[in-house]
Image: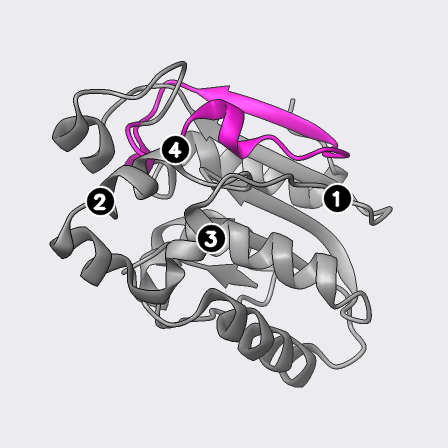
Amino acid sequence: MLVPGLWMPAAGMLPLAARLPRAYAKRFYGYRGRDSFEANVERFARFAREALGEAPAHFIGHSLGGALILDTLSRHTDIRVASALLIGAPARGCLAGRRFARGRFGRWMLGASQSRMLEREAAWRRPQPLGVVAGTRPLGLGAALQGGLPGENDGVVRVEETAVDGMTAQALLPLGHSLLVVSARVARIAERFLAAGRLE
């Protein structure tokens, strides 16, 4: 199950999906990023139940799509999981998003998803593996418009914002935020994680 980031169509996950083995049946989930994040969690839960039934699935999400996966699977424990991989996901909120929301245009662009940008705790309490991939090259709208972000970051999400208590492993790559989802290296990491539950 592949979920794109904010403002991206489900097809935004196609470059990554194309690099994953054909043995995996790929399903894509698109959502309206400006809608209420809580409402999107409930919609995604319904979609997952209908699409997967009783079969466990691997979940891969980029950016806000990763946060959507984390929150949905944490709240709806009846959804069966084989593994989850979050790529550049603002699990603990997003400073760049909060800064962006200070302006009228930013508030309009983020819409009701602004609440997910607030600082928060993030934890994974399922027994199945959770992997986190974070970028360390500050190339992104957040860095360009806001004069940089503190600490290691991918230009939009800081590495510390991607950390999830209870995660199985975290991989740091010298990539900007948008490039994470089209990177061949990330695809290789994802393939290894789906097969063995490890990032290294």
Expressed as whole percent of the image width and height from the top left, the position of residue 49 reads 69, 80
Residue sitting farthest toward the right: 127
Contact flag, marks 2 and 4 (Cβ < 8 Å): no
Q: Is residue 34 left or right of residue 108?
A: right
Q: Quick check: 179 above or below 74?
A: above
Mark drawn on residue 102? 2
Q: Can residue 173 be seen in the rendering of this structure? A: yes
Residue at the bottom extreme, as displayed: 50
Q: Position of residue 187 (x, y in %)?
A: 47, 39
Q: Is residue 115 above or below residue 181?
A: below
Drawn side of residue 105 relative to residue 129, left or right: left
Give the spatial CA distance, label 2 vs label 1: 31 Å
Q: Amino acid at mark 1?
A: Trp
Number of marks present in the image shown: 4
- Which residue is label 1 attached to? 124
Could you tell whether 139 is left or right of 104 in the image?
right
| Residue 44 falls in image quadrant | bottom right
Q: Secondary structure beneath disc 1?
A: loop
The disc labelled 4 sits on which kind of residue?
Val
Give yes or no for contact between labels 3 and 2 (Cβ–Cβ under 8 Å).
no
* Secondary element at image label 3: helix
Q: Which residue is found at the position 37% from the left and 22% from the top?
A: 153
